[in-house]
Amino acid sequence: MGLIEKLFAGLQYLLPHHLLSRLVHAFMRIRFAPVKNSQIALISSLVGVDWSEAKLQGASDYTCFNDFFTRELADGARAVDPEPKSFVSPCDGKISQCGRITTDRIVQAKGHHYSIRSLLANDPSALDFNNGFFHTIYLSPKDYHRVHMPFGGRLQRMIHIPGRLFSVAPYTVRQVPDLFARNERVVSLFETSHGPMAVVLVGAMLVSSMETVWSGIVTPPRGRKVTRGDWSRRDILLQKGEELGRFNMGSTVILLLPPSAVSSVEPNEPEDIVVMGQKLGRLC
């Protein structure tokens, strides 16, 4: 298994990540009904989408496959934990890793760590999260692909960091060093009543774009320079459970909290399945 993983991961170094993702971007936006209906029916069946949770129940209700992929859930499909001091999972998915941040280092997989500074492109806010807490959640193709607020906060800055687009499937995460700090990503930094909070959307192979509710589509277009936007004067206040953004194709969300914010965390382990709104821990 280890050798096969290494071969598949090694192959990705040779692939044209952005070209493949641009092709998928176009393919998933075909509006010709016979094609897009077939796409939705085939792929949803292959990956095991739970149609009972979707607000719109038929392939013909969606304008294209991407519209289906970022589908809205039916009322009541998710319950946001009501405890005032809880923080919750921002998305559906599987816990990749979680726990304490050791100074500047976050666990990527067994034997692999990466730095907060690299993840946040040397933003000064990286220091706030030293010795804090993190949750890394992997979204598979069958999952709900909208991202929500873990608890209430006011948007301060957004950073778009260009990079590679390695797959974030578990076998690649185990094999590619510093993967999350190498892939393209969108960092949203919030100020909360418990201190700063960072929600990082990590791009991946075939993730054709990422977007936020305040800025719309962030990628594409893609550039080579880090871009930092100051949103502190826009008074963008989002409450726990409100939509923050979405992936157009699957990827990973990383939640960062400072040590002073968290009083306890739920006993989650790698490979545990979580859903949006599920309690991850308690705030101080």
Image (cartoon, rainbow, N blue to C red):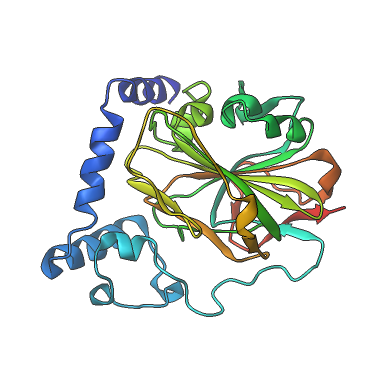
Vertical placement of residue 73 versus 22, above or below: below
In which image quadrant can residue 283 be found?
bottom right
Asked where in the image residue 282 lies, by quadrant, the reply is bottom right
Q: Is residue 25 left or right of residue 10?
A: left
The quarter of the image holding the N terminus is top left
Q: Nearer the viewer, residue 146 or 281?
A: 146
Q: Give the image location of residue 239, x and y in percent.
A: 67, 65
Residue 143 shown left or right of residue 256 in the figure: left
The tally of labels here is 0
- Is residue 215 placed above or below 171 in the rendered structure? below
Going 62% across and 60% down the picture, which residue do you hit?
A: 236
Q: Residue shown at 24%/69% (left/top)? A: 63
Residue 194 spot, x, y in % from top left: 81, 51
Relative to 211, is 176 above or below? above
Farthest residue, direction front: 233
Q: Is residue 82 left or right of residue 63?
A: right
Who's the residue at 24% across and 37% down the image?
Answer: 20
- Percent x, y for residue 141? 39, 52
What residue is at 30 percent from the left and 31 percent from the top? 17
Q: Position of residue 179 (x, y in %)?
A: 49, 27
